[in-house]
C-alpha cells in the first residue's frame, strides 16, 4: 500500500523523502492504487525545463469524470456529492447524490454533443455558483471538450478577450445571478461580449432569476428544455494523459491574460492526493471551500479534488455578508461542515464585525481550517484560530497558484506544527528553492529570496494557450532549469516557508490577482489622461488596495478631478471588472522615470504605503523633482 494518507509528522518526512528521491516510483504507486485507468502509461515522467516540456503518465488512457463520478456509483451512489447552498437562506439547499450527478452530467454532455461540441473544442462558462457550473465543467471533461471558466465578476470586454483567445465555440451562462440582495444581468454581459466574438455559435442559458432577457435567434437556447430531452447516459471519451482538460486565465504583469493550460492525468492525481492529505478528508466528512469555481481554487478544491475522492463538497452561491456577516457560520452549523477553506480577505472582513455573529452558531463540527490566495497576517490568523477553530482545528495556510494546479506549500493537519503566517513545508513531491538576484540558490536557512520549484510535479500547467514562448519566458527564463513562481519567500531557522508576496507587477487585491498593465491601459483610454502607474498599498481588509498615479494631458485644464476619478474607475469596471477599481487616485504633473524612460514603481510603492523616509536614492532619475511633488500631495 502506498502512503495515500499521511498520519503524522514523522511519516510526512518519510514520504517526502521517498517522493523526491524517486518521484517516478512514488507517483506511479499513488496513481496505480487510487485511480481508474482504461490503459496504463508507458512512462511516468518525461521532462525538460529548457523547452519547457513536461509529460506525466504518457500513454495512459482515462477520463477524469469516470474517476469523479462513475467509480463511486456502486459504493457511494446515494451519498451527497454536491451540496448546493443558495444565496437566499430561505431557499432550500440541494443535495445532489453521486447517482444524480452522474445523470445530470451525462444529460449535459449529450446536450453539448447535440450542439456539435467535440473532443478538443473549447467551451466557455460564465456562470454564477449554481450546480450547472460544476455540472457543465464535468460534462465538458466527459466528452473531452476543454472548459474555460471565466469568473462571473469580469466585465464583458474581459470576457470577450478570454473567449477569443481560446476560440471558444460555445458559451454557457445564466439569465442572471444573485449576489446578496442584488441581481446581476449576466446574459446582458455575455451579449455585449459576443458583439466582439464571431467564433461563438451557441449560447446555452440556464434560468436562475426571474428576468426578461433577449434570446438571439439561432444562437441562444434555454438549457433546461434541452436537458429534459437529453438521454441520461453518456459514454466517456477516452483521453490521453496529456490531453488538455481546461484553460484558466490568470493575470500577467504585462499584456493580455495568460490562458494556463492543464492536462488530464497529472492534474487528476495531484488534485486528489493533495485534497485528501491537506484537508485530512475522511469518508463521511462535509467539506466546504468558499472560493468561486471561476478561480483555480474552485476547480481543484470544489470540483475535481473532492469528487475524485468521493467527498461531499459544498457549493455556496452567495456572499459572506448576506443576509448578515454570520452567514458562513450559519452554513457551517447547518451542514455540520468539517473542513472549511477560505481566503484571508474574507477572514479579515468577518473579524471586523466582531464575534457576536460567530458565537450564535455551533461550530463544533469543524476539524480543519484552511486559507489560500494571499499571505495571512498574524492578527487574522489568530482570530481564525481562536474564534472559528477554538484553538482545536489546525489552520492549513496553503500556498499555490493557477499555474501549479494544486497546493504546493502547506502544513499537513495534525502532523505539521503550524506557525502563524507561515505556509510551513513543501507538500509531498515539491522541491522549492530560494534564489538570490544573481541566480544562485540560497541553501541555508534564515534567508529570503525568490521562490522557485526545482523539479516537475504532476499538476503543473503545461503551457499558455497559444503562446508557448510566453510560458517559457514568464516561468522558465528567470532562473536556469527552474520554475519561477513570481513570489518572494523567506525560510526560517527550521526550514519553514513564509510567502512574502509578489515580486513582479501583479498585485493581489482581496485574493484576486491583478496585473498593473491592463488596469493602466484602461485608465489611459480616458481622453484627459496622458499616463498612469498603478501600485499596491496595504489595506486592512483587502490585503492590498490599488493606488493610481495619473498625469493629465492638459494640466492647466480646470477639470473637476472627482469626476475624472469616477470616470477612471468606470473605465476600469468596464474593461476589467469592479474588482480592479482604484481606492486612491492622485493626479500629478509627472511620474518618476529612469533615464531609459521606465517608470520607477518602487518609489511610487513607498509613497503609496506611506513609507516616505525610505525612498532611497533618486539622483539617477530623469526627473527627480516630481518625487517631491508626489510626496507632498500623496493621499
Ligand atoms: C498568492 C491561488 C501567500 C501568491 C491558489 C501566488 C499566497 C498567487 C498564498 C496565486 C498563501 C496564494 N500565502 N500568498 N497561502 N496562496 N498566494 O493564481 O502570490 O489566484 O503567486 O492562485 O496568490 O494566485 P492564484
Image (cartoon, rainbow, N blue to C red):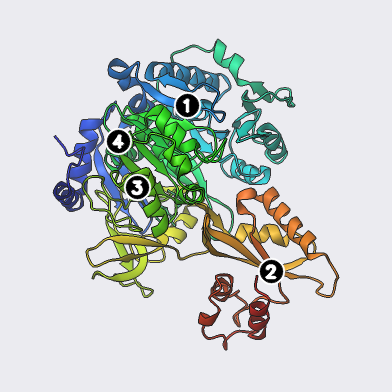
Label 3's element? loop
Sequence-first tag of 2 and 4? 4
Among the two numbered marks 4 and 3 on one chain, the one whose residue lies closer to the N terminus: 4
For the residues marked 4 and 1, what is the alpha-carbon distance in whole angstroms?
Answer: 37 Å
- Which numbered circle lies on residue 407? 3
| 492 lies left or right of 349 | left
In the rendered image, the residue lying farthest to the bottom is 619
User: Answer yes or no: do the residues labelled 2 and 4 have beta carbons within 8 Å?
Assistant: no
| Disc number placed over residue 586 in the picture, else none | 2
Q: Quadrant of the N terminus?
A: top left
**Pointers 4 and 1 in contact (C-beta within 8 Å):** no
Asked whether the residues under the numbered discs 2 and 3 touch, taking CB atoms below 8 Å apart as contact, a structural biologist would say no
Label 4 sits on residue? 59
Query: Which residue is drawn at the image coordinates 49% and 57% (left, top)?
Result: 470
Mark 4–mark 3 Cα distance, whole angstroms, equals 26 Å
Dots 1 and 3: beta carbons under 8 Å? no
Provide the residue designation for mark 1.
84
- Viewer-side residue, 491 vs 124: 491
| x, y percent for residue 513 | 52, 53
In percent of width and height, residue 82 lies at 42, 26
Instruction: Depth check: give the residue in front, 226 or 98.
Output: 98
Looking at marks 1 and 3 on the same chain, the residue that comes earlier in the sequence is marked by 1
Residue 483, image quadrant: bottom left
- 449 sits left or right of 522 in the view: left
Q: In what quadrant of the picture does the C terminus appear?
A: bottom right
Amino acid at each position: 500500500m502506498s502512503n495515500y494518507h499521511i498520519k503524522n509528522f514523522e511519516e510526512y518526512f518519510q514520504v517526502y523523502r521517498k517522493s523526491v528521491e524517486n518521484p517516478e516510483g512514488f507517483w506511479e504507486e499513488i496513481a496505480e492504487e487510487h485511480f481508474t485507468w482504461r490503459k496504463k502509461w508507458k512512462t511516468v515522467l518525461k521532462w525538460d525545463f529548457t523547452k519547457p516540456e513536461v509529460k506525466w503518465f504518457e500513454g495512459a488512457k482515462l477520463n477524469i469524470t469516470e474517476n469523479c463520478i462513475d467509480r463511486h456509483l456502486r459504493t457511494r451512489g446515494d451519498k451527497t456529492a454536491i451540496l448546493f447552498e443558495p444565496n437566499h437562506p430561505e431557499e432550500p439547499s440541494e443535495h445532489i447524490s453521486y447517482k444524480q450527478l452522474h445523470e445530470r452530467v451525462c444529460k449535459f454532455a449529450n446536450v453539448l454533443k447535440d450542439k456539435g461540441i467535440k473532443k478538443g473544442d473549447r467551451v466557455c462558462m460564465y456562470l454564477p455558483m449554481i450546480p450547472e457550473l460544476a455540472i457543465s465543467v464535468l460534462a465538458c471533461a466527459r466528452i473531452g471538450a476543454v472548459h474555460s471558466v471565466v469568473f462571473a465578476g469580469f466585465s464583458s470586454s474581459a470576457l470577450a478577450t478570454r473567449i477569443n483567445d481560446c476560440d471558444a465555440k460555445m458559451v454557457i451562462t445564466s439569465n442572471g445571478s444573485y449576489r446578496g440582495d442584488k441581481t446581476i444581468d449576466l446574459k446582458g454581459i455575455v451579449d455585449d461580449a459576443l458583439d466582439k466574438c464571431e467564433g461563438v455559435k451557441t449560447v446555452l442559458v440556464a434560468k436562475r432569476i426571474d428576468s426578461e432577457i433577449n434570446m438571439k435567434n439561432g444562437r441562444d437556447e434555454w438549457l433546461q428544455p434541452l436537458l429534459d430531452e437529453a438521454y441520461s447516459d453518456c459514454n466517456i471519451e477516452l483521453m490521453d494523459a496529456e490531453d488538455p482538460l481546461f484553460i484558466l486565465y490568470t493575470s500577467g504583469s504585462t499584456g493580455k491574460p495568460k490562458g494556463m493550460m492543464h492536462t488530464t492525468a497529472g492534474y487528476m492525481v495531484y488534485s486528489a492526493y493533495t485534497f485528501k492529505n491537506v484537508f485530512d478528508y475522511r469518508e463521511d466528512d462535509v467539506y466546504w471551500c468558499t472560493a468561486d469555481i471561476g478561480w483555480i481554487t474552485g476547480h481543484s478544491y470544489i470540483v475535481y479534488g473532492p469528487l475524485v475522492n468521493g467527498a461531499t463538497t459544498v457549493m455556496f452561491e452567495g456572499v459572506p455578508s448576506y443576509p448578515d456577516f454570520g452567514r458562513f457560520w450559519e452554513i457551517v452549523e447547518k451542514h455540520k461542515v468539517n473542513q472549511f477553506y477560505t481566503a484571508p480577505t474574507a477572514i479579515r472582513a468577518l473579524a471586523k464585525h466582531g464575534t457576536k455573529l460567530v458565537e450564535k452558531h455551533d461550530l463544533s463540527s469543524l476539524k480543519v481550517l484552511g486559507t489560500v490566495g494571499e499571505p495571512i497576517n498574524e492578527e487574522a490568523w489568530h482570530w481564525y484560530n481562536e474564534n472559528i477553530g477554538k484553538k482545536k482545528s489546525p489552520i492549513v495556510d496553503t500556498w499555490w497558484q493557477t499555474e501549479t494546479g494544486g497546493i504546493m506549500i502547506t502544513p499537513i493537519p495534525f502532523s505539521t506544527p503550524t506557525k502563524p503566517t507561515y505556509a510551513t513545508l513543501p507538500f509531498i513531491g515539491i522541491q522549492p528553492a530560494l534564489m538570490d538576484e544573481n541566480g544562485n540558490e540560497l541553501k541555508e536557512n534564515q534567508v529570503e529570496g525568490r521562490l522557485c520549484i526545482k523539479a516537475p510535479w504532476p499538476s503543473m500547467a503545461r503551457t499558455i494557450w497559444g503562446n508557448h514562448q510566453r510560458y517559457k519566458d514568464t516561468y522558465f527564463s528567470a532562473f536556469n532549469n527552474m520554475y519561477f513562481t513570481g513570489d518572494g519567500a523567506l525560510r526560517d531557522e527550521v526550514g519553514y516557508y513564509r510567502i512574502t508576496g509578489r515580486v513582479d507587477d501583479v498585485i493581489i487585491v482581496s485574493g484576486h490577482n491583478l496585473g498593473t498593465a491592463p488596469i493602466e491601459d484602461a485608465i489611459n483610454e480616458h481622453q484627459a489622461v496622458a499616463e498612469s502607474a498603478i501600485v499596491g498599498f496595504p489595506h486592512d481588509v483587502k490585503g492590498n488596495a490599488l493606488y493610481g498615479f495619473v498625469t493629465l494631458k492638459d494640466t492647466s485644464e480646470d477639470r473637476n478631478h472627482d469626476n475624472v476619478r469616477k470616470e477612471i474607475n468606470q473605465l476600469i469596471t468596464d474593461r476589467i471588472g469592479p474588482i480592479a477599481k482604484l481606492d486612491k487616485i492622485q493626479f500629478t504633473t509627472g511620474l518618476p522615470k529612469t533615464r531609459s524612460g521606465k517608470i520607477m514603481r518602487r518609489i511610487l510603492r513607498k509613497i503609496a504605503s506611506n513609507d516616505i523616509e525610505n525612498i532611497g536614492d533618486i539622483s539617477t532619475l530623469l526627473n527627480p523633482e516630481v518625487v517631491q511633488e508626489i510626496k507632498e500631495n500623496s493621499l
